[in-house]
Amino acid sequence: MLKVAIVGCGKIADAHLSQLQRVKGCQVVGVCDLEPLMARQLYERFHVSQYFGDLTELLTVAKPDVVHITTPPDSHFDIATLCLESGCHVYVEKPFTLYEEEARRLIALANDRGLKLTVGHDDQFRHAARRMRTLVQTGYLGGRPAHMESYYCYELDRSSYAGALLGDKGHWVRRLPGKLLQNIISHGIARIAEFLTSESPHVMAYGFTSPFLRSTGERKIADELRVLICEEERTTAYFTFSTQMRPSLHQFRIYGPENGLILDQDHETLIKLRGARFKSYLEHFIPPLSMAQQHLGNLITNLGIFLASDFHMKSGLKYLIESFYRSIVEGTSVPIPYREILLTARIMDTIFAQLDAQQREVVPGHLALQTADENGRPSSLHSTP
């Protein structure tokens, strides 16, 4: 029986505890938050045995085998370090760390102590995503990926935490190197990193503040991002993050030398794209019929999962937790290879460095901030320091 603890008792901790109640072979022995009232409310609602306001006390008294870190990203490195040094395996919510170097140091520490780490990229373990991975691994693409497209959108709903972010100039998201982007985009970047083969792909990023966000008076947060990722003479990829495009997509497309696949997270569907064309007018009839049959097949599959009581928003989280715990108990490989964690962090570091260079082009006596005009065209706003 693995003893599990949660550090950080905000909204995402609820999701973790909800799934942990469905995972066999574990017991939640404590929850912890710097604000004891936050820890207490989680302890009461989920009937946890203990709650703490101090991490060292949690580690000493509860003695967990595994710690889930669900705090803001700027605290991930320090908390994970302390947990590893105390002999705990660690599940870190996304983004794993603020910088690749921190991720590298955590992985080295875990390896040195014989412990295991994972990151909360649970979207990669939802039902349709697992079916996609199986098809790629069994050769459906006909070879290594030639091109990928990852879309990860976010709607700026003022009733959500985005409202708090926009209304609070001291919000913790604003202190992140990549601000709003850093707290969200790792899901979409990780999908690409999973299928890249080189360790240092070329990355070209362009980001800006949308006209909508500018209309609220915001000038420092980029909420639109376009990224091109290239491996030397191998795979290319596009990554798109947007708060404004509709429909708001959470989608991944992967193309090989023979066939392609489209994963739609919002609809929980996986569509096979046949590479070869049909002759003459058959190309106008057979592919639409095939698409209709595949969508019907996805519907039937989703209904079956629903009837089995496993069709819910965080099914990927449960699968990831179970896989991580299995790797601990059985001594097998972690569900997300450390190489992918590091590559995701490296790509994000490069993106934010390029955005910083774009947004902070210093000219004598002025600071240039990259934004967009009312038509979405790039423009520069200049302010005297």
Image (tube, rainbow, N blue to C red):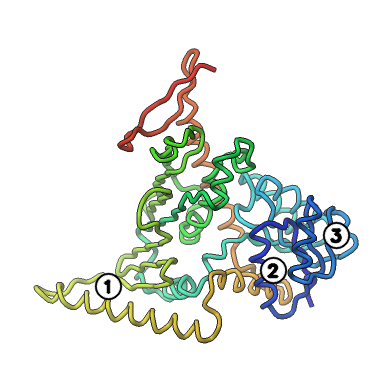
List x then y, in percent, for residue 113.
79, 59
Residue found at x 67% / y 78%? 22
The residue tagged 2 is 17
Residue 233: mark in rendering: none
Asked whether, in this view, residue 345 is left or right of residue 60, the answer is: left
Tell me the kind of residue under disc 1: Arg
**Residue type (three-letter) at the residue carrying disc 2:** Leu
Element on which disc 3 rests? helix
Percent of width and height locating residue 282: 13, 76
Q: Secondary structure at mark 1?
A: loop
Residue named by callout 1: 274
Judging by the rendered image, the residue that carries numbered circle 3 is: 59
Q: Are marks 1 and 3 in contact (CB under 8 Å)?
A: no
Q: Disc 1 or 3, which lies upstream in sequence? A: 3
Of the pair 95 and 280, the residue shown nearer to us: 95
Rendered-image quadrant of the C terminus: top right
Q: CA distance from mark 1 to mark 2?
A: 41 Å
Asked if 176 appears above or below 49 in the picture, the reply is above
The amino acid pointed to by label 3 is Leu
